[in-house]
Amino acid sequence: MPGRDEHAWNHERSGPLRLSGARVPALLAAIARALEAESDRWFLWTPVLYAAGILGYFALPAEPAATSALAFLLAAIGLCLAVRGLGLGLVVGGSVLAIAAGFATAKLRTEAARAPVLVKELRGVTVRGFVERYEPRDNAKARITLRVIGLGELKPDETPYRVRVTFSAASGRFKTGETVALKATLRPPPEPILPHGFDFARTAWFDRLGGTGYAIGKLERLPLSGEPPWDLRLWASIDGLRATVNDRIRAQLSGEGGEITAALITGERTGISPKDHQAMRDSGLFHILSISGLHMVIMAGTVLWVVRALLALLPSITLRYPIRKWAAATAIGAALFYLLLSGAAVPAVRSWILI
């Protein structure tokens, strides 16, 4: 610093460094006291530390080996066993174990979702597969997600598990579980356009989506190529029920009112006009169309109240059995049914777990 004695300045800078060594034990003791005072809240930090492990996994510049995740988890378990008898050993060991568990879970999820991904664009390739999802889009377009049976001349170990294709809605409407064939141009899932932007390729990886593109010509229904997988048969029956419910709603409520009601009950939003979509966004009400906590609470709460009220009318049952638990179990089952009927989107799944 200009105008100051160099020796005095160096002495002033080194003073706190010499004192810091003496302050460390006092600082550690203060931290220990603060942690002990919050002992009843230690468990609340578990999901935070678990999430930190997951974030740490995704922050790595390269994919870690499975052995690294396993070694980290085993080391954390060993640390818990080694320090469990110390004063704050449970806090330290448990924290490291929660982080390691999050890291290992993210790695396990990555490996469980592992499936082939296209490495280059394929033009005019023939795709055969089971319909997983049909989605009407704007401008006379539709989008279909296929669980691939065969894709051109690719070998089985190079064939994506599923692909998503946009095509003309004039080809018709397709049901879950149907077998179709089409010619399409497919590309690998796109990488982020901007640094730190939305990474569609990563989302596609965990959805086991190995390619996206557009159809060339019409889609053709094929004779059933074997029985569809059990989960597609299950979703086919649920989709049939959803279509029946939507038809009943639209028969009673025509126009936009029926479309919005269908969206609130079954999650089917494709019939809502772009104008109303934009109006709900502008008014801050668009989130109401996404089935989540509000809808689950209304559904489960209503069922809980009605079932308990009806059982309370029967003294022979009320005085002998835990009708509140029965009502709660019924409400959970009703919420599960609503979850499946609405398509089991992520917000709805999260809300059902909380219910």
Image: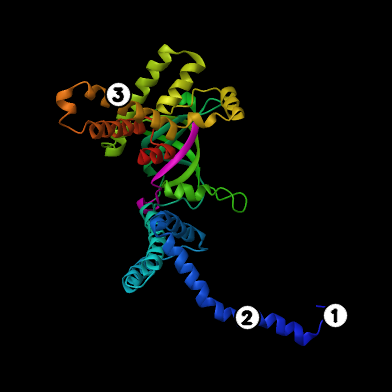
Residue 56 in the image: x percent, y percent?
48, 61
Pointers 2 and 3 in contact (C-beta within 8 Å): no
Q: Is residue 50 left or right of residue 325?
A: right
- Asked which secondary structure carries label 2, the reply is helix
Mark 1 and mark 2 lie on one chain; the one further toward the N terminus is 1
How many neighbours does mark 3 have within 10 angstroms: few (below 14), some (14-19), or many (20 or more)? few
Residue 41 in the image: x percent, y percent?
41, 56
For the image shown, how many numbered marks are present on the structure? 3
Whether residue 175 is visible to the viewer of this picture, yes or no, is no
Quadrant occupied by the C terminus = top left
Residue at the spot of label 2: 17
Type of amino acid at the residue the image marks with label 1? Gly
Q: Is residue 351 left or right of residue 191?
A: left
Residue at the spot of label 3: 306
Residue 156 in magenta? Answer: yes
Q: CA distance from mark 1 to mark 2?
A: 23 Å
Q: Quadrant of residue 67?
A: bottom left
Residue 225 in magenta? Answer: no
- Asked which secondary structure carries label 1, the reply is loop
Which sits in the foreground, 281 or 203? 281
Vertical comparison of 327 with 5: above or below: above
Pointers 3 and 1 in contact (C-beta within 8 Å): no
Q: CA distance from mark 2 to mark 3?
A: 69 Å
Residue at the spot of label 1: 3
Q: CA distance from mark 3 to mark 1?
A: 83 Å
Residue 65: mark: none
Q: Is residue 339 left or right of residue 203?
A: left
Vertical comparison of 264 with 36: above or below: above
- Asked which secondary structure carries label 3, the reply is helix
Q: Give the residues in magenta.
A: 155-167
Mark 2 and mark 3 lie on one chain; the one further toward the N terminus is 2
Type of amino acid at the residue the image marks with label 2? Leu
